[in-house]
Amino acid sequence: MNTRDRFHGIAHGKDVDRLPILEWAGWWDQTLERWHGEGLPSSIQDRYDICRHFNLDLYAQNWVQPRKSSCPKAPKHGVGIIDDEKGYELVREHLYPDPITNESFDLFFKKWVPLQEKGEAVIWFTVDGFFWFARTLLGIEDHLYAFYDQPELLHRINTDLVNWIKMVYSRILEHCEPDFMTFAEDMSYNKGPMLSEDLYDEFMHPYYREVVPLLEKHHTLPIIDSDGDISTPVHWFKRSGLKGVLPLERQAGVDIDALQSDHPEMVFIGHYDKMVMNQGEDAIRREFDRLIPAAKKGRFFISCDHQTPPGVSYDQYLTYLKVFKEVGVM
């Protein structure tokens, strides 16, 4: 089987020869800085060259941004760039670019589509979701108040966003049908979701229902990317037609066995506890022992439950990969 065969096999609950050895996200800068001093050649900087260095399966991601380069930057993390609808009017001209105006958009597909067609790479794309994007505009605290104080603004932002996402997808389809995609949401923390089901149904569900059928029509698997404990909102996402979730953070209390029991038709990616990766081979093996039974059920891709932290040395990461390749034979 090739890389693409394995992806679609697992995603559809079919037997495969082995689990994909994948990193759904790139590595922290601090992690790579450490590894470049411990054995990773300093000449290897590109995310996918690093994948090739470690003999990982190639999952090529294009995160299409809803901001033009002229868009104002927030002064610090968690702070917004608008306060109200008047502020949105002022920045709107700096939002929702046509991706063909960005040279890197076409170059990405020219590079990766030939590999996808040969089965050597999986192509996926990411867009900001209907919780994430408004939060980046308003800032964390003001965004949460806006569900009550400025509901019309949130609906306007999400209407513009869903129309932009549909346009972006039409541009992507000029190149290929992506194997999957992710909506960046991060709407949970380690105690559960940041909003209620009623607010989800009012402010997010209608917009997912606009775009998800289009994705499915063109065989692109729609997946939610949300950190934290997503055990409760995964029920909501499923009602909206989403077909998978990542990264299933172990430290937030996510339980793959419970998720598979409640949602056997959904796809899950991640859940390998990154906090054991620097604790020695025995601990690394125990974590795989916990996850392999779930992987054998299908529709579950084992991967680091976020990005490999800088506390993991180059040699420890090689041990993680060595064990992964041993136990991943199905």
Image (tube, grey):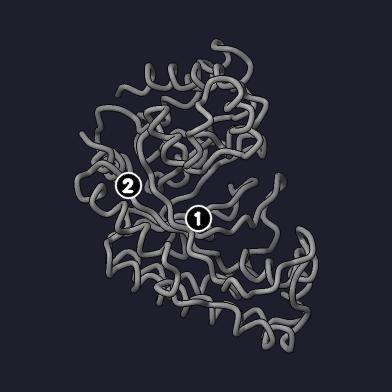
Vertical order, 204 against 229 (above or below) = below
Q: Specify the quadrant of the image occupied by residue 221.
A: bottom left
Q: Specify the quadrant of the image occupied by residue 98.
A: bottom left
Q: How crowded is mark 1: few (under 14 residues within 10 Å), some or many (20 or more)?
A: many
Q: Is residue 226 left or right of residue 108?
A: right
Q: Which residue is at a point 26% across and 49% down the rendered structure image?
A: 116
Q: In this view, does 171 lie to the left or right of 74?
A: left
- Amino acid under disc 2: Val
Residue 311 image offset from top left, x and y in percent:
67, 26
- Amino acid under disc 1: Ile
Q: Which mark is residue 122?
A: 2
**Mark 2: which secondary structure?**
strand
Q: Residues within 10 Å of mark 2 (few under 14, many from 20)?
A: many
Please, which residue is most extreme toward the top here?
282
Q: Which residue is at a point 40% across and 64% down the rendered structure image?
A: 105
**Residue beneath disc 1:** 224
Q: Nearer the viewer, mark 1 or mark 2?
A: 2
How far is the residue under mark 1 from the one under mark 2? 17 Å
